[in-house]
Image (cartoon, rainbow, N blue to C red):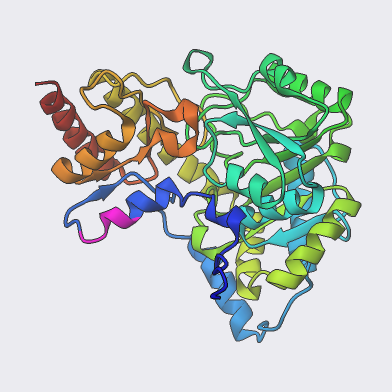
Amino acid sequence: MKATRRPLTNAKVARIPASGIRRFFDLTAGVEGAISLGVGEPDFVTPERFREAAIRSIKDGKTKYTSNYGIRPLRDAISAHTAKLRGVSYDPEREIIVTVGVSEAVDLAMRATLNDGDEVILADPSYVAYVPGIVLAGGVPVAVPTREEDAFRLRPDDVAAAITPRTRAILLGFPNNPTGAVLEKEDVAGIARLAAEHDLLVYADEIYDRLVYGTEHHSIISQPEMKERTIYLAGFSKSYAMTGWRVGYACAPAEIVEQMMKIHQYTVMCVPTAAQYAALEALQSGELEVLRMVGEYDKRRQYMWRRFNDMGLHCFEPRGAFYCFPNITSTAMPDDDVFCEQLLKHERVVVVPGNAFGERGRGHVRACYAASLEQIAEACDRIERFVEHAAS
């Protein structure tokens, strides 16, 4: 009797869909003349001083493994940077770990703190990796709908309604990818009160914290007594134009960082040494570069946002990150997947379906304004032509 063949793959992984962002990125391959507003990547080259620091480290023979926690000068710089920016001091010896991008930091944070069945509250829509990350860590994602009329903010009253005895943590990804939403000061204070009242952890993914326009980013770690229950996650990819260097970091209570380090130690060992020296230079000398790039993003943001509204695709004004999230339900397209597929086919422009980011993303598309203003203008002309033809 022949034995029944067992599945070759892990059932938990098999249930997770592939990223909707990468699907459209892959579809672009081979489409001549395509303009991509799909991937959230700065069009700026990493500033020369950062690149030179990495090259110098290699020439100086700094090519060995580093501490699992990251090189000490970088951790010192992260500590000083966070104290200056957020008014919160972290011990560089025990409370900071350098990670392979913020993506690894988010994964480590969840795997180090979640037990099977623990619930994690997060905004819907949110970044595509959050729900799979929670599931892979054994947790249960609890998506709280955010609304366009509320500027896609995560409201404390809605969070409170989602809390159950199984709730372990709240995941805050603001400024938000894909919507560009930012939280108001009262939102952050209210969520902090809920975390304290219900003894919850907070994962604060603030990779876009420097990319805000005409407003201020309010970090939950700046709230009273939140340092002890927050895992603060940040990095260099977006604000410093260092996506390919893959350097992020996490700041948290020492007992949590120690557990994160163990997973990090057994999987990747350490972040590439040269990349760490580039990140160190970014913190030491990169502030003017950050301000320069933010100024350019702001020009692009205002242009794209106005163009979408002028062509009849209602779009609330994004105040953070580098995405617009227009509503496409006014078109004749049956859903956002079809809109994106047909836009690529007929006008060679890549945007990402809103449903890739959660149920509340349906009827929207994400367009990234980290491309050049010239490319954005041409892409908007093509989208406008597509929308006009779809309506005829």
**Rendered image quadrant of residue 382:** top left
Task: Tell me the residue at 32%/41% (across/down).
Answer: 351
Which of the pair 76/188 is nearer the observer? 188
Q: Position of residue 173 (x, y in %)?
A: 62, 36
Residue 322 in view here: no
Q: Residue at x 37, y 37 (%)?
A: 353
Residue 177 among magenta residues: no
Task: Work out whether residue 25 or residue 359 is closer to the camera in this orientation and state it.
Answer: 359
Residue visible at 49% across and 64% down in the picture: 48
Q: Is residue 227 left or right of residue 366?
A: right
Q: Quadrant of the C terminus?
A: top left
The magenta segment is 26-30
Q: Is 29 placed left or right of 65 in the picture?
A: left
Find residue 206 and report its horizontal and vertical position in percent. 64, 41
Look at the image and say whether residue 27 sits in the magenta stretch.
Answer: yes
Residue 236 falls in image quadrant: bottom right
Residue 82: tell me if it is visible. yes
The spot of residue 38 in percent (x, y) is 36, 45
Q: Quadrant of residue 61?
A: bottom right
